[in-house]
Amino acid sequence: MASERTEKEQHFIKLLKQNALKVTPHRLRVLQEITHKDAAISQPDLEKIVGKDIDRVTLYRILSSFEDKGIVHKIFDLNGTATYAICSAECSADHHHDQHVHFICSVCNSVFCLQEISLPKIPVPPNFTLHSIALNAVGLCDSCQKEA
Ligand SMILES: [Zn+2]
Ligand SMILES: [Zn+2]
Ligand SMILES: [Zn+2]
């Protein structure tokens, strides 16, 4: 569906501009791939998909700039592999507001954002600084459930 793709692409262009990032085909491509499926995409998978067009160093730079700007967030799957998911609109540079629970499938290792379940406030000892909380729900995703 060409019209849908255009709409999505326009949204990405706006997103990049809002975050003072130059609109480049590489950046648009990475955003397309990250949002392609419901599940988050792992860095190795992303490398496999875009590897022909974008070298690893460039991809790494794109991902870390997206993370800094609050465009994507990183989740570690059950193997400790970095996976990326698109952020909610409230996220901004250096401030992710979308701290939520992630569901990880124990069979296929897919990571899903459970946007509606926010993380509890964790009181930390004095002089401690909290940077992030990771809370994962582990189980079977719908497609693995069907196969079981
Ligand atoms: Zn975020
Ligand atoms: Zn699964
Ligand atoms: Zn998420």
Image (spheres, rainbow, N blue to C red):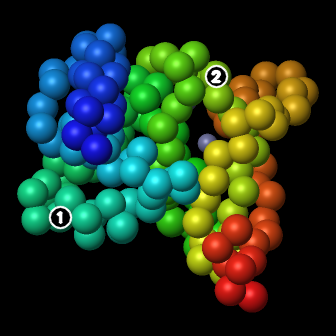
The residue located at (30%, 27%) in the rendering is 7
| Cβ of mark 2 under 8 A from ligand 1 | yes
Q: Quadrant of the N terminus?
A: top left
In the rendering, at what x and y percent does residue 129 appear?
A: 72, 26
**Residue visible at 33% across and 51% down?**
33
Residue type at mark 1 is Gly
Asked whether residue 12 appears in the rendered view, the answer is no
Q: Secondary structure at mark 1?
A: loop
Task: Identify the residue position indicated by label 2 in the image.
Answer: 97
Query: Where is mark 1, residue-wise?
Result: 51
How would you rate the neighbour count of disc 1 (Cα within 10 Å): few for under 14, some for 14-19, many for 20 or more?
few
Quadrant of the image occupied by residue 99: top right
Q: Quadrant of residue 27?
A: top left
Relative to residue 129, is residue 81 depicted above or below? below
The CA span between labels 2 and 1 is 31 Å
**Residue 22, which numbered label?**
none
Q: Is residue 144 above or below residue 95?
A: below
Name which residue type carries label 2. His
For the residue pair 97 and 13, the one nearer the viewer reads as 13
Q: Position of residue 112 (x, y in %)?
A: 63, 53
Residue at position x 72%, y 44% in the image: 114
Most extreme residue toward the bottom is 148
91 left or right of 20 in image: right
In this view, the residue in front, 146 or 127, is 146
Q: Give whichever of discs 2 and 1 has the lower sequence position.
A: 1
